[in-house]
Amino acid sequence: MAKEPKRPEDLSIWEDAHAMIRKAKAEGIETAWDRLERQTPHCKFCELGTTCRNCIMGPCRISTKPDSKMNLGVCGADADVVVARNFGRFIAGGSAGHSDHGRDLIEVLDAIVQGDTEHYHISEPEKLTRIAAEVGIATEGRELNEIASDLVDECYKDFGSRRSSLAFLSRVPEQRRVLWDRVGITPRGVDREIAEMMHRTHMGCDNDAPNTLLHSARCALSDGWGGSMIGTELSDVIFGTPTPSRSVSNLGVIKEDKVNILVHGHNPVVSEMILAAARIPELVEKAKAAGAAGINVAGLCCTGNELLMRQGIPMAGNHLMTELAIVTGAVESVVVDYQCIMPSMVTVAQCYHTRFITTAEKAKFTGAMHFEVHPHNALEQATAIVEESIKAYTERDKGRVEIPAEPVEIMTGFSNEAILSALGGTLTPLIDAIKAGKIRGIVGIVGCNNPKVKQDSANVGLAKELLKRDILVLVTGCVTTAAGKAGLLVPEGIEMAGEGLKEVCGALGIPPVLHLGSCVDNSRIMHLCGLVAKELGVDISDLPVGASSPEWYSEKAAAIGMYAVASGVMTHLGLPPNILGSETVTNIALEGLEDIVGAHFVVEGDYVKAAELLDARIRMKRVGLGLSE
Ligand code: NFS
């Protein structure tokens, strides 16, 4: 009997998604859910992580059945080696993504220092000077440009091979650094760890699964405390440190009477310029002359988070809303840089008047319009993109427009600086609230959507479960939009929190779920953990904290999970990585890492059970610190 097609209500918890899935179906447009259905069931070997394509003696499939004739690849690699190699490369891919994004920020700061751009500026001299001092650069009595030039050098050095540890490891508690040294996973250089992972996983190199896994931890640490951290800090220096502000979210932020430009991808370098161009009075006039009421820039995914955090720009949606946003029929252009952009969006855009515009030399899409953006030409290119979007508006088919929701209010902008300032300049009130059990612990819920999970059911469900238990929730990446749409990112959200959390957040006038930014901004959470641990004189692994990625899909999310665990934070994943074909690798991830780095992964698809696991961990850590459960 043929399988019943899934109803939109089974695919997502959101009404704006249901409406657009129905519209897509009616208009013959396919989405990730349709393609997932056709791809299911997936290859079992790939799911278990036991396929190897690293050489052409193969490709090999390693059977996990004890009596099989296929227990070894042609080279002799067993399931443990193959799974560890695949996982290692997976982590290296994720670390490379975030870290190369970080490098792009160094290049922009470099261009500012060299006078090669008129479009970008140092907007936070105070922060630049502060972080320069933090990484050991002399700042007293020096010109800002000199300090910035030295900071550029320090950051570039973090990507190379000449260091024995990264500059920002000064933010890591001493105990943790000693542990990393002892275990041999102190990250030395971002590119070095990534390249070494590629080397180790070539045929005939690292054939000891635990050893490969340890290097995957080092590789991920070079992202979390290196590439991502540089990305976050330099973005603040160039575009401003986020401060709390209000905005709105869901597909209702797309405006029927305006030229709608959606920025999608990750790096604020492009999206900030699009926003700047969209505010140029002559361009607004042009849009009006074309019959529109103005120009509306809204975000998708992480570049949306970047603009939301710093500029209060509305957020149209997270990962699984990206195709659906175009289906509203009211999007003039989707302007992308890189990462998490489904190639299918080119096709979806072609079904409408929508321009799909790429901007990065390293992320071209066949069939897209390409306006390459560099520091020296950024505003000109952004202007051309906005003009193209205005032209597209004149081609919009008004009969096909459907905007399915009213926007929901959200509050954003909780950088660590903003959190400290909300607390009156010191961490003491937060630590006191933790000690008193009013805030029992803190969990970062981060990451994506995955069409294998009903969209945002677990992202929102887990957050609500934790709030009830007086656990403060921090969100980044695509969980932001989920929490926002569920009403958790406004101060009124405290109604869903336990008594203690309600009291603390109520007194401070902050939401019970704080938005800390994009996925590179998970480095802010790591930094915060470092600050709290140092203040208490303990290791990060002693803190009543946890991390979770309930609906993750990407290599980057795996790298984040790995650096969280390696930094001492137990991390929940809603879906397993493709490692289950190796008992050795699976056992290390789920248990063994606890003995090595003081934290481990847990995999649990049920968000209530996941909340219980995170709660139990927090209880244990509270007792360890001599606090009430
Ligand atoms: Ni993170 Fe951001 Fe979203 Fe997942 Fe992708 S946008 S970097 S990987 S899907 S949270």
Image (cartoon, helix red, strand yellow):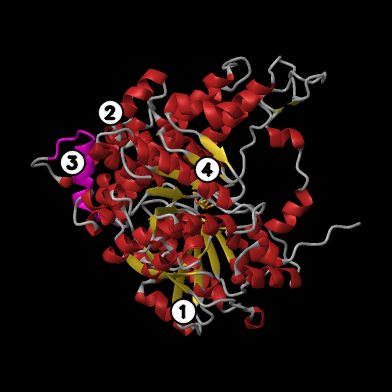
Task: Categorize mark 1 by other alpha carbons within 10 Å: few (<14), some (14-19), many (20+).
Answer: many
Label 2 vs 4, first from the N-terminus: 2
Q: Read off the magenta span.
A: 123-139
Q: Name the one closer to the observer, 473 or 18.
A: 473
Q: Which of the labelled discs sits on residue 572, or is there none? A: 4
Label 2 vs 3, first from the N-terminus: 3
Q: Which of pointers 4 and 1 indicates the residue nearer the eye?
A: 4
Label 3 vs 4, first from the N-terminus: 3
- Judging by the rendered image, the residue that carries numbered circle 2 is 174
| SS for dot 4 | strand
Q: Which of the labelled discs sits on residue 146, or is there none? A: 3
Task: Categorize mark 2 by other alpha carbons within 10 Å: few (<14), some (14-19), many (20+).
Answer: some
- In the rendered image, the vertical position of residue 206 relative to residue 329, given as above or below: above
Quarter of the image with the C terminus in it: top left
- In the displayed structure image, the side of residue 622 where residue 560 appears, left or right: right
Q: Is residue 319 magenta?
A: no
Label 1 vs 3, first from the N-terminus: 3
Marks 3 and 4 in Cβ contact (< 8 Å): no
Q: Residue furthest right?
A: 1
Q: Position of residue 501 (x, y in %)?
A: 36, 59
| SS for dot 1 | helix
Mark 1 vs ligand 1: CB under 8 Å? no
- Judging by the rendered image, the residue that carries numbered circle 1 is 287
What amino acid is found at the position of numbered circle 3 in the picture? Answer: Glu
Q: Name the one closer to the observer, 71 or 370.
A: 71
Quarter of the image with the N terminus in it: bottom right
Alpha carbon distance from label 1 to label 2: 56 Å
Label 1 vs 2, first from the N-terminus: 2
What amino acid is found at the position of numbered circle 1 in the picture? Answer: Ala
What amino acid is found at the position of numbered circle 4 in the picture? Answer: His
| SS for dot 2 | helix
| SS for dot 3 | helix
